[in-house]
Amino acid sequence: MANYDPRKNSIKVYQNLKTVKDSTQDAKHHDEQKSQAVELYTYIATWGLMRLKGEDPALVNQIQKQKIVRCFFQTLGELVYPNTQPNPLIGMEGMRKIIGLSASEYLGLTGVALQVAREFSFWAEALYAKPKSNNGVNQTTNQATTVGS
């Protein structure tokens, strides 16, 4: 019996998403990537995995979002088909693979995709976090004050 390690999905998503972030220097692009990564779960739950795969070529003018969608399918392929080369979910072959699945296989893949999308959302919030500014908060709160003196 194979051992299930719940960290496997999380580790793979973290590594792949961090690679995309680290290869992009402009903070404006980081915002676009984060937004797309956070929205993956809702998109898949609403429209389905096949529609998300169909979005890839449509995002040609939104390169940062396209990078995240491609990273998502790369990650999903690495997790679901770990011993298959090339990754069967990459490029147009990925669409053919998804279309060729039986209904139960498609539903199973969608279930895994939703779990992976949750990980993308979590790690996007962590990896793309911006340092918070204090916005004028008084840092000298350690001083004692007395009332009525």
Image (cartoon, rainbow, N blue to C red):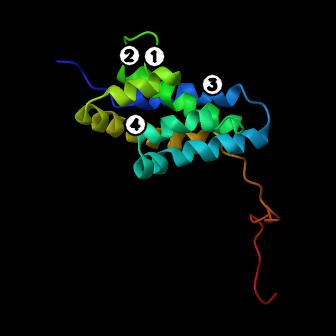
- Front-most of residues 71 and 86: 86
The quadrant in which the N terminus is found is top left
Q: Residue furthest bottom?
A: 148
Write down the quadrant of residue 82 in the picture: top left
Q: CA distance from mark 3 to mark 2?
A: 19 Å
Q: Residues within 10 Å of mark 1 (few under 14, many from 20)?
A: some
Q: Earlier in the sequence, mark 1 or mark 2?
A: 2
Q: State the residue position of label 4.
A: 113
Q: Quadrant of residue 129?
A: top right
Residue topped by disc 1: 87
140 relative position to 64: left or right: right
* Residue type (three-letter) at the residue carrying disc 3: Thr
Label 1 – label 2 distance at C-alpha: 8 Å
Secondary structure of residue under mark 2: loop
Element marked by disc 3: helix
Counting residues from the N terminus, which is met first, the one under dot 2 or under dot 4?
Answer: 2
Q: CA distance from mark 1 to mark 3?
A: 18 Å
Which residue is at 78% across, 43% downward?
Answer: 28
Tell me which numbered mark, 3 or 2, is placed earlier along the sequence. Answer: 3
Q: CA distance from mark 2 to mark 4?
A: 15 Å
Front: mark 1 or 3: 1
Observer-side mark, 3 or 2, equals 2
Q: Is residue 20 positioned above or below 27 on the image?
A: above
Amino acid type shown at disc 1: Asn
Residue pointed to by mark 2: 82
| Crowd rating for badge 2 (residues with CA inside 10 Å; few <14, some 14–19, many 20+) | few
State the residue position of label 3: 19
- Give x and y (percent) for residue 70: 56, 29
Task: Give the x, y percent position of residue 116.
Answer: 43, 36
Distance from the alpha carbon under mark 4 to that under mark 3: 20 Å
How far from the left and from the top, in percent, is residue 17?
58, 30
